[in-house]
Structure formats: structure tokens, C-alpha cells
Image (spheres, rainbow, N blue to C red):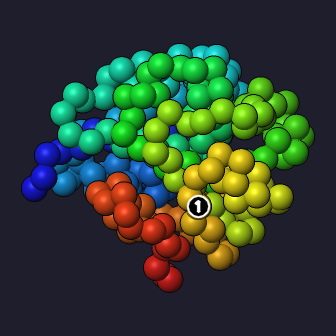
Amino acid sequence: MTTPRSCLILHGWQNHRPEGHWQHWLADRLTALGHQVTYPGLPDPDDPDLDVWLGELARHLEGLGDTGERVVVAHSASALLWLHAAARGMRQLERADRVLLVAPPSGSVLARHPEVTAFTPPPLDFALPGPARLVAGDDDPYCPEGAATLFAGPLGIPADILPGAAHLDLDAGYGPWPAVLDWCLDRTVPLTTRPAP
């Protein structure tokens, strides 16, 4: 096997890391392959505090290994967490060699939920500190404007827009998702939908 990677997997709002979720599945698969995996439960996932989550992000990035590639996979509110950290110039982001932003929600949706309005995307007038890729459903109810238009275009990053993938969560059937594992192991692999059940 090549040098083990360090992988940080970040969940979103109201995600209590259920075992059936693709992030849990991904953490298990990467660990079984010998990679160092950090999959933290972020504080108060039902009523998150942006500044607290930013502090946790910095702490977990500092804890990534110093050998091998460092990969971050951030879903939903944590994709926005990454953008807020970049907008604020968080130096720890430079510890990641690449990041996958999965299904970031739009500000128009977050505005309807007081628990997460602080996560509303910042103005995307900055450059991300390292390679990033976006993956989202073409019918995500949490981003009706379309993630390619709202995020990938302004950030200048590649995007995989998946048909019928909704919010890429358990409700959309995203338990095992081999494509995200493949991407963690090889940045050139495109993200595709999960296999049909």
C-alpha cells in the first residue's frame, strides 16, 4: 500500500453520525485500508455555533498526520464551515492537501432555520487555500439554486453534479458510496452516484 493518508471527515447540521450514513461507511473503509481517519462528533449538531465549530476545525486540522496526503471531506454545513474558515484566512486550512465539499446548502434555505443562519455562506470573493472539488445533487432541496452556480462557479473549482442525489444523505439513500472512497484514494477520480440498491 502507498503511504497512509490522514483523512478528516466532517458532518453537517443535525447529523449525529449514524452508522448507516456514507460518512460512517467511508471512515470504516479508510480505516480498514490502513489510513488515519478522524471523524469527530462536532459540538451541538442540532444547534451548532459557528465559532465553536471553527475552533474544532482548526484543532482537528492541527491533529492531521505529517506524512502522506491529508484529505478532508466536508458535508453540508461543514462544507460551509470550510468556506467561512477560508474567508477568515484560517492558517490551518493549509494543512489539507485537498478537500471535497459535499452538498453545501444555500443561504436562502439556511435563512429559514435560526439554528444555522450563522453558517450562511460568506461572500465568495476569496481563493481557497488548496485544491478543492464540489459534489452535489442536481435536485438538492437544501440548495435549490444549484451548487454549481452558487459555489463551484464563483470559487473556480471543479464540480460533479449528480442526478437525483438530493442532499447526498441517508434520506437520499447514501449509505455505502464507493465513488467517494475512490476519490479519497485518487483525486483524479470523478464523483458518481451510488450504485442502485
Picture residue at 62% right of the left edge, 50% below the top = 156
Query: Looking at the image, is 51 positioned above or below residue 123?
Result: above
* Residue 110 place in picture, x, y as percent: 82, 40
Asked if residue 116 can be seen in this view, the reply is: no
Residue denoted by label 1: 159
Picture residue at 67% right of the left edge, 21% below the top = 49
Q: Quadrant of residue 7?
A: top left
Picture residue at 32% right of the left edge, 39% below the top = 70
For the N terminus, give its image quadrant: bottom left
Asked if residue 47 can be seen in this view, the reply is: yes
* Residue 116 place in picture, x, y as percent: 76, 32
SS assignment at label 1: strand
* Residue 168 place in picture, x, y as percent: 60, 61
Q: Residue furthest left?
A: 1
Query: Looking at the image, is 178 positioned above or below residue 34?
Result: below
18 sits to left or right of 187: right
Looking at the picture, which amino acid does disc 1 mark? Ala
60 sits to left or right of 107: left
Q: Quadrant of residue 138?
A: bottom right
* Residue 154 place in picture, x, y as percent: 71, 48
Q: Residue furthest bottom?
A: 196
